[in-house]
Image: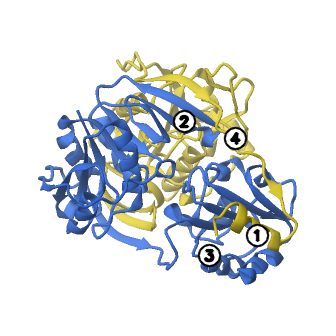
Chain colours: A yellow, B blue
Amino acid sequence: MKILVPVKRVVDHNVKIRVKTDGSGVDLANAKMSMNPFDEIAVEQAVRMKEAGEATEVVVVSVGPAQAQEVLRTALAMGADRAILILADGRVEPLSVAKILQRVAQAEGAGMVILGKQAIDDDCNQTGQMLAALLGWSQATFASKIEMEGAHALVTREIDGGLQQIRVTLPAVVTADLRLNEPRYASLPNIMKAKKKPLVQQTPEDLGLPIAPRLTVLRVEEPVARASGIKVGSVAELLDKLKTEAAVI
Amino acid sequence: MAILLFADHDNASLSEHSARALGAALQIGPEVDILIAGQGACAAADAAAALAGVRRVLLAEADPLAERMAEPTAALIVQLAVDYDTILAPATSSGKNVLPRVAALLDVMQISEVTQIVAPDTFKRPIYAGNAIEVVQSTDALRVLTIRSASFAPAATGDGAAPVVAVDPAAAPALSSFGQNLLSVSDRPDLSSARIVVSGGRALGSKQRFEAVINPLADKLGAAVGASRAAVDAGYAANDHQVGQTGKVVAPDLYIACGISGAIQHLAGMKDSRIIVAINSDGEAPIFQVADYGIVGDIFDIVPQMERAL
């Protein structure tokens, strides 16, 4: 079984982003960029499944600018076999990404697609579900455990009240939640080896797909800041404030 | 044209998220139908019909819908979509699972986690863990939205005037099957709709100490228990207790953060709370920047003091 792992290049999770003063977006100039943390978990999962003999090949794919090669090389250093970059500058919405991934998954004959449940930049949480819909495959979102059972996979999902186990028929799309695994750090020899692994580039036009956005971003605003609070000196003072000033207890 | 609300429920009862999503829907337009997809879900349908402002309740019952598996549920919503120009759901694990599948089948770009209705086609939503707010306008003929329920007041419970209409489930291939739910059993209120939340962080140091320090205060206040990602990663609290960008987003009347430093990912999940209390030994911790009331000190000393004084 071949596993396809889509990965997204996003602003690093430690970067505190700033909204541009003209409201046109967020200022990412010179910001450190990394692989979306949930996609890192997806790569780790696919590599572990290959190591366990459950997968034969791990192919990583990214839709993004030329610099997205860096996150693909990171995935190759973690153990993926080869990479595909679909070159697209600017904002590409999850629906367009899902359409591109649909073509790639079909062309590759993937038996499973594993990807992060959401990207930490647009926080959409859509791509995996949309891809499953377009492919007509089953989906298992927010996975914290994947167990292979022949033509099926038993997936444990994180839901609001706890966990849920479902059995999906393969091929399937699985989206990774935080506790699926802890991604490895790539070793230096593996980083060197990754430079020689195949990475091909294509464009959405090669796949015959338009990627014009459906949503118009009118502006991007600063969130409303909370008024600064006070420090109190004792528990008695705190409880008094909560009772009389805030009236919440 | 009308609005279809895919409700969150457990067949026996309707979750408060559904009433809050209805509050959002009624800001878009007056004709709102609520879809109850389930099995043996009459009680949830009756609860939906009792909400003020509902036009009709559509009740679709079938075994594959009992747990609202994504494939048959999305097929059902797509089958109903022709009568609506907006389809929405609360951004619960069920809504987030099903609605993007619906959107793709309808060739629509979904708008996730809407926090404000600006116009029927224009919405505000947080991006970058809530560090920026995007104002987006849809160019699609149909809109598909998930609603961040913490940002909207629930619709009132009315007098149950809305009719309940049975609809047929859609024919969908059985691609997946339900196994079992392993739900946390707790007498405490639901974290995402509780009026008071007491949360603990990594400073608690162990699962035993987390439970010994956080739980008594929560029980005294009738509060839900939350946790930072660090505390969940360390195994002090269950996964579904996590508050933050990738966990639950809460906006209670009172949020008490105990030993939580306040990483931006955590703040994303609680900074819309009405009153925030921070207790931390580090007076420079970022949590104090969003707190209405802060106490600098040892949580093992202060939290039990609070519990005894209540």
**What's the CA distance linking mark 3 and mark 4?**
28 Å
- Of callouts 1 and 4, which one flags the residue occurring earlier in the amino acid sequence? 4
Q: Tell me, yes or no, whether the two marked residues, 2 and 3, touch with CB atoms within 8 Å.
A: no
User: Residue at 20% of width from left, 48% of height from top?
Assistant: B76
Q: Tell me, yes or no, whether the two marked residues, 1 and 2, touch with CB atoms within 8 Å.
A: no
Q: Which residue is mark 2?
A: A122
Q: Position of residue B136 (x, y in %)?
A: 48, 28
Q: How many neighbours does mark 3 have within 10 angstroms: few (below 14), some (14-19), or many (20 or more)?
A: some
Do circles 2 and 3 both sit on a common chain? no
Report the disc number at residue B221.
3
Amino acid on which the number 3 mark rests in the picture: Leu
**What's the CA distance linking mark 2 and mark 3?**
36 Å
Give the structural element (helix, strand or loop) at label 4. Answer: loop
Return the residue nearer the eye: B93 or A49.
Answer: B93
Q: In this rendering, would B207 be left or right of B40?
A: right
Look at the picture and state if A98 lies above or below A3.
Answer: above
**What's the CA distance linking mark 3 and mark 1?**
15 Å
Amino acid on which the number 1 mark rests in the picture: Asp
Q: Which residue is mark 1?
A: A240
- Of callouts 1 and 2, which one flags the residue occurring earlier in the amino acid sequence? 2
Amino acid on which the number 2 mark rests in the picture: Asp
Q: In this rendering, would A160 be left or right of A232?
A: left
Return the residue nearer the eye: B300 or B223.
Answer: B223
Q: Which residue is mark 4?
A: A225
- Of callouts 4 and 2, which one flags the residue occurring earlier in the amino acid sequence? 2
Q: In this rendering, would A209 be left or right of B77?
A: right
Do circles 3 and 1 both sit on a common chain? no
Give the structural element (helix, strand or loop) at label 3. Answer: helix
Name which quarter of the figure residue B253 lies in: bottom right
Quadrant location of the C terminus of chain A?
Answer: bottom right
Q: Position of residue A140 (x, y in %)?
A: 38, 54
